[in-house]
Image (spheres, rainbow, N blue to C red):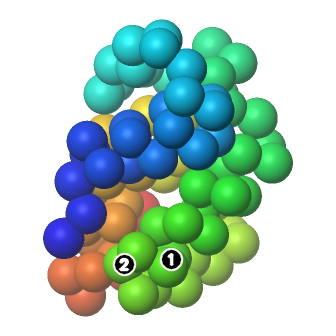
Amino acid sequence: MITINSIKQYVTTTLLEGSTDVLEDDQDLLISGVLDSINVMKLAGYLEQECGITIPPEDIVLENFSTLEQMHRYIVERTSGNSHKR
């Protein structure tokens, strides 16, 4: 199972190219400008690959991808068979 820390590590090392900025689990990464729409798509692809799931385009919304906590919760729901939850 993927963890919040592994998502955070991917964001900082890959998407932010090793940035030393500290990301909080509940920080809004989109509004704060940490992530843009292209990076969100890259992150969704990473999560699909790591978790063996498909993320439908309609699920790539603020409610699921604004914070590390929301991303993790979404992935846990998808991988536990509760993909209908939002």
Residue name at image x 25 percent, y 63 percent: 2
Point out the residue furthest to the front here: 18
Residue name at image x 48 percent, y 11 percent: 21
Q: Amino acid at mark 1?
A: Glu
The front one of 25 and 81 is: 25
Q: Quadrant of residue 26?
A: top left
In the picture of the structure, the residue carrying the numbered disc 1 is 48
Residue 63 visible within the image: no
Left or right of 22, for residue 59: right
**Disc number at residue 40?**
none
Pinpoint residue 84: horizontal percent, then vertical percent.
Answer: 39, 80
- Element type at marker 2? helix
Q: Amino acid at mark 2?
A: Cys
Quarter of the image where the C terminus is located: bottom left
In the picture of the structure, the residue carrying the numbered disc 2 is 51
Left or right of 66, for residue 5: left
The relative height of residue 38 versus residue 42 in the rendered view (above or below) is above
Pinpoint residue 64: horizontal percent, then vertical percent.
Answer: 48, 51
Pinpoint residue 48: horizontal percent, then vertical percent.
Answer: 50, 76
Residue name at image x 59 percent, y 55 percent: 43
The relative height of residue 35 versus residue 61 in the rendered view (above or below) is above
Tag 2: Cα neighbours inside 10 Å, few (<14), some, or many (≥20)? Answer: some
